[in-house]
Image (cartoon, rainbow, N blue to C red):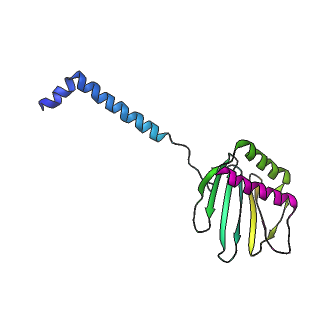
Amino acid sequence: MFNIFFFIYNIDGMMNYLLHLLSFLAILCVCGCTAQKYSPDTYTGTRLYFGSGGGITGAVTTYCLLDNGRLFRAEDLKESFERAGKVPAKKRKALFEQCQNLDIHQYKISRPGNLYHFIELRDEAGQTRLTWGATDYQPAPEVLELYRELMAAVSRGK
């Protein structure tokens, strides 16, 4: 009992106690201020999904580029997206501009083959998915160019 009273009235002990308390609170604040966590599933802005799939295994690789530049990747066996890097602002703006100029919502392409590629735009205007790969079909050159640019951004975004 005497030790408790001694500690309370001991200025050095009290200062030491306050120092430890403030250190603990500072660490707690830093840990609480982590970066915002989100995924393509919860993001509300414009999203571009793209990738390829098919073949003997039927494996599908999907990338998702958010309009803030974050890049995500998912394999068909995994249920969620994982971060795959960030696309620089200049390139990101160019890709979304290219998509807007293409007016992707006007296209109605659903021609998958054994191996196929896709681009899907989800924005305030809705959701449009372009899928191609059939041997007897070739999409418009501007669609192919957008796909090539998106895939190039993946290799640069890592």
Q: Return the residue nearer the eye: 9 or 149.
A: 149
Image position, residue 5 (x, y; %): 16, 27
Quarter of the view holding residue 74:
bottom right
Image position, residue 123 (x, y; %): 74, 53
Image position, residue 140 (x, y; %): 87, 62
Q: Quadrant of the N terminus?
A: top left
Q: Main secondary structure of the magenta part?
A: helix
Membership of 142 in magenta stretch:
yes
Q: Is residue 79 left or right of residue 13?
A: right
Residue 108, placed above or below residue 22: below
How many numbered discs? 0
Residue at (67, 56) in percent of width and height: 64
Seen from this angle, which residue lies furthest left?
Answer: 2
Residue at (62, 68) in percent of width and height: 76
Residue at (21, 26) in percent of width and height: 8
Residue 39, placed above or below residue 59: above
Residue 15, placed above or below residue 105: above
Quarter of the view holding residue 142:
bottom right
Q: Is residue 141 left or right of residue 91?
A: right
Q: Which residues are magenta?
A: 131-158
The reply to whether residue 122 is visible in this rendering is no
Image position, residue 37 (x, y; %): 56, 48
Membership of 26 in magenta stretch:
no
Quarter of the view holding residue 19:
top left
Seen from this angle, which residue lies furthest top?
Answer: 11
The reply to whether residue 113 is visible in this rendering is yes
